[in-house]
Image: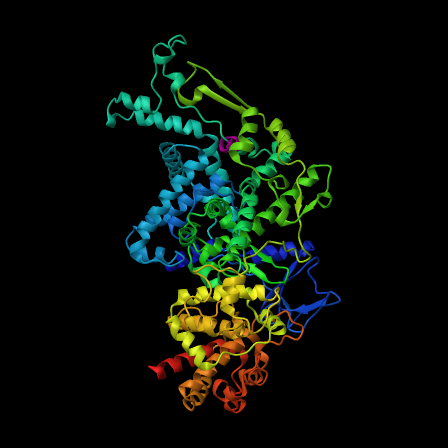
Amino acid sequence: MPQDNVDEILRALEIDHSKTMDDYNAGHEIPKLWQCANGHRYVIGDCGNPNARGRCPECQIDIGGARYHVAAEGNLLARVADQTQPGHTLGAVESRSLEALPERGMSAAACAVLRFLTHATLYISAGQLGQLSEVCQLVRPAISDAEVIPFFWGHLQKDLQVLQRVLGRSCDDVYLLLHHLCHQLTKLSTVHYWTPKLKSKKEREEWERKFTEHYIQPLFQQTEEVIKNGNDLLVSDTRQGQNQLLNVVFEVSEQDEQSDEDLQHTAAPWKYRTRITVDHFFRKFELHVHGNQADSDRLPVLTLFHKESHHLRALHYVPDILALQRHLLQQLRHRLSRVDVSKTTVRDLLDKTAENPELLKLLEVFSQAWDIVKDYLFSHRCQTAEGKIVHLPEEYHTVRIGEKSPVGVLLPDTEGPGRCAYLLIHYLLVQHNDFLQRYCPHTRHTFDQLPEVPVHMLTRRHLVSYSPQTDLLPLVLAHCNSSLHLGHGDGDSATRLDYDFQGFELQLRNTLLLGKSRVLRGQRGDMEIETMSYCADITSSKLINRLGEKISQEALEVRVQRQITSEFQENLTDICQAIDSVNTTLTFLLTLKVTADQSLHAFMVETLRMKDNEGLRHSRKAQQYCCLKHVQSLWLLLCFLRARILATHNEEAFDEQGRELRKELSERQVDEVNSILRRLTPERVELVLTQIYQCIVLRLTGHSQDEDYASPDNYSLRWLLTDSVENSVYSIPGEDRQQDQLAPAELESFPESVLASQAIPVWTHVLTHLTERQQ
């Protein structure tokens, strides 16, 4: 395969949606995607032009504009670049489902056939001399040359399974249909239907349309005839001998005499007959309206329903997903960190919760809905009420959801793996509203007249959804005429199935589409989807400040901190358990009347009734010494220990902090920081490490929505450290101040060029420096 051909295929496989969006925007008033001066994206609703100013949710600089045409400085319309990668991007065969989906105006069955032919072509090409590496270049993500042939062979086997399901045929029947198609392709000239240069989406779709029209659609219309002729050829093949068993297997044997009085010895009634299923009904409907616009116009609602049937089938799971998510969120809220939900698998959580039935049910319905629509989530974007753009993480583009998946994928969130659940719910509810908007012109109501329902109140009666077996199959059976004629042919030709499509459409309106509601959306087009709250969300600086306003806080002495640290012996599990207990205590301290000198351990055991495996059971010193006035200092110590252990083992220590605090240090800045650290004793370096950590947790996070918030790019870390020392969040006894706290003079030589936005890399560097000196 020459390199020019590889480039041609890559271009052919690309889909550029940007021009499509530009053409659509030219004639419609729709929300538009903008970006701030720093490149962060946001959406302007209604006409899409700026008429009000705000602040970027990511960096807090001005966004929006005035008078619909004056944008804030540096704000531009964002280019809608296509996210589709060129080449083969389906990933490993294990990540594919058996669900066949309609794409680019083609039916699900046609798409499945085209995919099979593509994989067959790549498989054959890879086996030819000198072409293996060229074919390997097409695979995304990349695989080795040795994996190419097994890779495409696995996809071919999956394609056959998908075709069996979408066509409702056996494996042998699918082989016959594909063999017939390949025979037609080699026998007939394709020059009239092949576009030599597939450089654009439009050219590729035109080729797909012509190919489907001239080869695939006729195959579907002649399915019965093709299969019967194929079976006849197999039976009449003299190379296999006159095998009577083949006649019975392929149902081509003839009987000399048939009697309706001796049915047990008559083969005709017991032969395979086409099953009446929802899939068969829709296949017949496709053939009925294909190429006949008049029939399609007479059945507009059924045509629309069939076109969106895969989305509506997934919508059937949404009420169960929302209810089960609500139950799990109540159980897990404030008990897990973002690191926990990213590393803990569903199986791990099931083992800890004794096979939680709610979690098992959620996994089942979620994975079913995910398999149906995951291919549509790649390019889906949505905006939160705060203006943040949410999209699917790249690592989840081809993944299948199961017990080995992170539990976070089931818990809605606008960051991390929780985006899978958030986008799934959002996408399906948007499809529901879109369907109703297209359906309403066929009724006496307008879309705006439909009642609105918020997400948390949705039930199945509000949504246009269906179960194939319980909702649609009874309607199909009620509008199907099936007749069996003994002695009038062999096999399936003796059975005739006719459907009353008009009667079905009328019943569909009255049973599944009547009285539905639209889902309530906010001014930005957002939906009020309940999201996961993590343990750090209740221990932010605002909560700590509220605690300080109620109970005057004091710092633990350094010697006490060291004793508590030694008692935990760097056991991460014990430290996390203690943090959970302190987090729980914090929430109660804000509502109960207590005194500062009351024992923290006594409050946990006697007032909160914590169990033996909770509280401060791993530190006798903390039990004996800590009072309620030490809660903040103890919490900071425990969180610091957890972060230090995680960082030492090259794990994420600041899972709740955003990218605005992770700007890397330059080589010059590293040298300047090292120069200062070398002049300090290890004990003072540890104080620097602790002070930076406190600034990150208490000063740099959780304030982005404050009116006086300033971007960490706008001030130095030295200023922040000096200010935090001079304005300590708690009092330190005078005799211990010099030993237990840094002096402002010690920070004067800290490099001014190091910004607060580099706080996390600085903390990590100081920790590495301290560890090396202590060793």
* Displayed quadrant of residue 178: top left
Give the residue furthest to the right: 67
Q: Quadrant of the N terminus?
A: bottom left
Q: Is residue 654 above or below residue 250?
A: below
Q: In this view of the protein, which residue sits in the foreground, 443 or 153?
A: 443
Majority secondary structure of magenta residues: helix
Q: In this view of the protein, which residue sits in the foreground, 230 or 730?
A: 730
Q: Is residue 53 magenta?
A: no
Q: Is residue 727 above or below residue 214?
A: below
The picture places residue 546, in percent across and down from the top left corner, at 62, 71
Residue 157 falls left or right of residue 301: left
Q: Is residue 554 above or below residue 657?
A: below
* Displayed quadrant of residue 488: top left
Q: Quadrant of the C terminus?
A: bottom left
The picture places residue 763, in percent across and down from the top left corner, at 46, 78
Total numbered circles = 0
Q: Could you tell me which residue is drawn at 35 percent across and 58 percent down?
A: 143
Q: In this view of the protein, which residue sits in the foreground, 190 or 401?
A: 401
Magenta segment boundaries in residue numbering: 278-284
Q: Is residue 279 magenta?
A: yes
> Could one spot residue 1 in this view of the protein?
no
> Could one spot residue 523 in this view of the protein?
yes
Q: Could you tell me which residue is drawn at 34 percent across and 47 percent down?
A: 154
* Displayed quadrant of residue 487: top left
The coloring applied to the image is: rainbow
